[in-house]
Image (cartoon, helix red, strand yellow):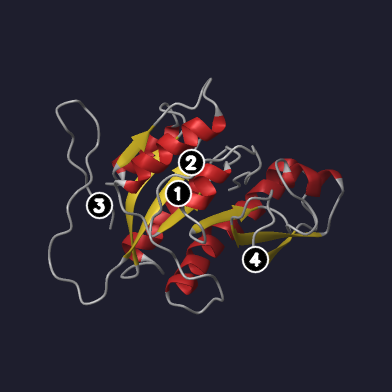
Amino acid sequence: MCTSVPISASGRNRPLQETGNHSIRKQRLAILLSGRGSNMVALVQAVQRGVLSGLAEVAVVFSNKPDAPGLETAAAMGCATASLSSQGRKRAEFDAEVVEVLGQYQPDYIVLAGYMRILSPTFIRAFAGRIVNIHPADTHQHQGLHAYEWAFENQLPETKITVHLVDEGLDTGPILAQHPVDLRGADTLGEVEHRGLAVEHFLYADTLARLIRGELSAPTPEPLLPSAAGSSPHGEAAGG
């Protein structure tokens, strides 16, 4: 289930202190989005009553857009939410502030779910080996935005959804899982997206569960580091 967070007198969210005894500590997820958050909804449902139940909890749903519809949806599902507007902000400066905010929630994993920002080294190094992204294409074939448009325009009979760790390149991090999407007969972009999202919604949660259970080869999560200084704008274009 999602954690709940009390509101301070200033109106800002304050992280809830850990309470109770647990034989196995659930991994805390910070889910980042910029829009409606369909992958976020699928992940929260998986935490509440699906493949992530007993393995994870949603520490916070964060957005760089305070008016993102996904924040309202997350709150209605019982999740703590937080936001900072990225409009007009320098990338590294903004990311350093986001790192500070997310650090209050003590996340084990940062889960990008339609977070439409290219992450700076400031962010990536702070959560090294613990940032997970979903990309609606084979990352060896297509990086960056408009992956479904690319598949549709090239009339591909099949594409792949990729879940990967984030490094300082653009969709270049280690691949954790892939699953094909049959596009035969998909004669509109909307149908391509519909088929792809159906795969995204089960693959993301399933891959996170396998990662948490130690079934996937990936770097061991490191302790949260202070925000590092970063100068290069290179980072990850979040999908999903």
Give the quarter of the image for residue 195: bottom right
Q: Nearer the viewer, mark 2 or mark 1?
A: 2
Quote the CA–CA distance across marks 1 and 3: 15 Å
At 44% from the left edge and 26% from the top edge, which residue is drawn? Answer: 85
Quote the CA–CA distance across marks 4 and 2: 21 Å
- Disc 1 marks which residue? 40
Q: Dot 4: few (<14), some (14–19), or many (≥20) neighbours within 10 Å?
A: many
Label whose residue precedes the other's in the sequence (4 or 3): 3
Residue 163 visible: yes
Q: Dot 1: few (<14), some (14–19), or many (≥20) neighbours within 10 Å?
A: many
- Disc 2 marks which residue? 33
Label whose residue precedes the other's in the sequence (2 or 3): 3
Residue 107, relative to residue 12: is it above or below? below
Q: Nearer the viewer, mark 1 or mark 4?
A: 4
172 and 240: which is toward the camera:
172
- In the picture provided, is 18 more to the left or to the right than 52? left
Across and down, in percent, residue 15 comes to 23, 45
Quote the CA–CA distance across marks 1 and 4: 20 Å
Q: Nearer the viewer, mark 4 or mark 2?
A: 4
Residue 114 visible: no
Tag 2 near tag 3, CB within 8 Å = no
Quote the CA–CA distance across marks 4 and 3: 29 Å
Quarter of the image for the N terminus: give it: bottom left
Mark drawn on residue 3? 3
- In the picture provided, is 204 more to the left or to the right than 54? right
At 43% from the left edge and 76% from the top edge, which residue is drawn? Answer: 213
- Disc 4 marks which residue? 175
Q: Nearer the viewer, mark 4 or mark 3?
A: 4
Q: Dot 3: few (<14), some (14–19), or many (≥20) neighbours within 10 Å?
A: some
Label whose residue precedes the other's in the sequence (2 or 1): 2
Across and down, in percent, residue 145 comes to 70, 41
